[in-house]
Image (spheres, coloured by chain):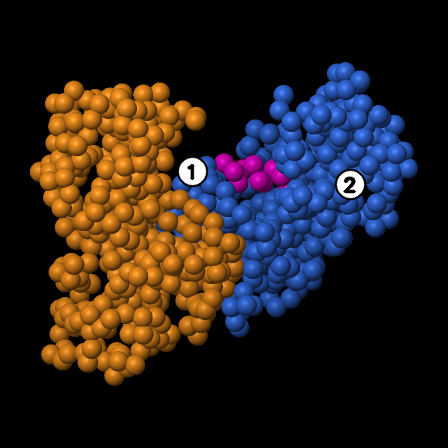
Chain colours: A orange, B blue
Amino acid sequence: MAELSPLAAMRLAIEEGKKGAGFVSPNPLVGCVILDRDHNLLGKGHHAKVGENHAEINALAEIEDPGRLDGAHVFVTLEPCAHEGRTPSCAKILAKLPIASVTYGIQDPNPLVSGQGASILRAAGKSALLFREGLQSELEELAEIFFTNMREKRPFIALKVAQSLDGKVALNDGTSQWITGEASRAHVQYLRGCYDAVVTGMGTFLRDDPRMNSRHPRFENKAQKLVLLDPEGKSFAKIKDSNLLTVRAPEDLIIVTGPLGMEPPVGRHIEVPDAEGSFDMFSLLPALQAEGLHSLFVESGPYTASQFIRSKMIDRLYAFVAPILIGEGLDWTAGLRVGALDQAVRLSNPRVETFGPDFMITGRPQTRFS
Amino acid sequence: MAELSPLAAMRLAIEEGKKGAGFVSPNPLVGCVILDRDHNLLGKGHHAKVGENHAEINALAEIEDPGRLDGAHVFVTLEPCAHEGRTPSCAKILAKLPIASVTYGIQDPNPLVSGQGASILRAAGKSALLFREGLQSELEELAEIFFTNMREKRPFIALKVAQSLDGKVALNDGTSQWITGEASRAHVQYLRGCYDAVVTGMGTFLRDDPRMNSRHPRFENKAQKLVLLDPEGKSFAKIKDSNLLTVRAPEDLIIVTGPLGMEPPVGRHIEVPDAEGSFDMFSLLPALQAEGLHSLFVESGPYTASQFIRSKMIDRLYAFVAPILIGEGLDWTAGLRVGALDQAVRLSNPRVETFGPDFMITGRPQTRFS
């Protein structure tokens, strides 16, 4: 077996952590890799489901011969937890083992327990090290939903757009099926499942009568929550017969309106205050948080997308860029105005992935919250 | 030394061929790799300058012990030339060597000599093989200028744009410095040198008074031809004191106007017919070809860029995409209209490269010529 460098071990732990996507909310995605004293791989694991084992425990479970833990090195993407919750404290479990070191990617962001996991390990004579060899943006991205929840006490918001290279999301007549190709659309199915709920607007609902669920096999049995933004209650007449309800239970449909004084015929209902003819975008977040939603995947037409961008409410953008030019068409950033180029909305840690002929550019726009 | 597979050898030959960029016009970029009978690397070479050695000869020159050519395998990106020109026939030279095989990436596109290089080799008992293990788009891209020149008897046209992720090339007031970062701009300096001339429009000339030369060290001593598109002769008053002439000889400045019956005070002058208030884009090409220009790098403001795109005259697009959102601003595909999404201008063989925080998406739009 080949030796793994600390960098390779942490990279592997990150890949491992991603395997829990969509099932750990409100916990963070965490991955763990354990090397023997000679840096050969002993085991790896991830936090797979909220309420079940943490990553460290799943990695330990892979090791058949406990003798090989003597002098072993643990790499985990997040500081091992100090407290007993639904599961026992990982730091305390690791402290009792004959391992030599625990290297963690990021310190626990909760100020009440931050550093306590490391202290428990050190008190037991283990070396507990914050990883400093790179991968910072990858480590941060892995658990970004959790970090935003913890630091800012609000849901994390991702926006997906499917655009041409020249920035158009539809022809002038609204036609947008399909700008991007099959591989991109399959990845969108995956992403839908990675968040607590999909959010869409009335334009998309009225035009496409979409299902807006994840058809990715991984998420076949996951409840598919959907938030419909419907300021004026225009969906009420059609909602009972819509495709939205063919793929989800009524309680997984959340209809957000302005103060109408009128209930939708089905689904959960949230009223938020009015603002400038639409409802107040900023009031949305506490309302959705109260519904137990820790992360949102916004997938909508140009109007709703530009509302979110203008409001600086997007934590992560997924722009699927098809290698086509449309020319005249609809922009998804219409209404955004910047006075100078250094005031443009800049994505931090941008990266690109290829899906068939398309490119997915993703990064984190600055928000109004930070 | 590690053995090279045929795929690895051809990939290396392509990388080698790129090293001639900017200095071989009107010849193709060609790279060559020679392996010994056991597939170990013996030598590699590229066509470095028009009039000088072809790639095969430069690869042979790297081999110190001629005995190792016994049973050797030659990989070359283009069929070895059959004819004697400024340099001897590569096929005839290879035919005299004790090599076993010649594998070439693409058959010579000139119908008069296509296949003749291979015939010469086969007549001498060598195996001459067209490469069929992939890399087709990379092989085609390497010599794409030459192929367009040969097949369509016209210059090859590349267009560069620097845009935000949402497709804008400037703010509404025209501000475009700088949308992309330093690494992107450095690569543009390189690309300028790879073509026979840079083409720009009056908007850029009047606004920026640019030099529009390549400051890449590779091209320090290369003549920097520039084509200024100036339908109405508006540059005439300013051209003598412009920055364009601080970095190039007057004979390397080519001013294209409509039929003015008036000469610019400096530089070469081409008149092309009028069309719809501007000059006829299509008449440009024969005129520039007559100037000995085999490839053009168009770098301009939104107006000229969209003229080229609308006219379907672009063979390769280089879109440098900054990870920023601008919202309201200038489009570079304004005026392009497609009736349905399947009529959008689609890039074939799209690929992406990273330059600092930016992404360069490049590919080949379909042209009116093909």
Horizontal relation, residue A62 to residue B28: left or right: left
Out of A118 and B191, give the one closest to the viewer. Answer: A118
Q: Quadrant of the C terminus of chain B?
A: bottom right
Residue at the image position 28 percent from the left and 53 percent from the top: A22
Q: Chain of mark 1?
A: B
Out of B170 and A290, give the one closest to the viewer. Answer: A290
Instruction: Count residues near mark 1 (Cα–Cα under 10 Å), then give few for <14, some for 14-19, many for 20+.
Output: few
Callout 1: SS: loop
User: Which quadrant would residue A263 be assigned to in this image?
Assistant: bottom left
Horizontal relation, residue A7 to residue B303: left or right: left
Looking at this view, name the residue that lies furthest to the top. B65
Residue on which disc 2 sits: B129
Marks 2 & 1 on one chain: yes
Horizontal relation, residue B229 to residue A201: left or right: right
Q: In the drawing, what numbered circle is on residue A101?
A: none
User: Which quadrant would residue B343 be assigned to in this image?
Assistant: bottom right
Residue B367 lies, in percent from the top left, at 64, 59
Q: Quadrant of the N terminus of chain B?
A: top right
Q: In the drawing, what numbered circle is on residue B356?
A: 1
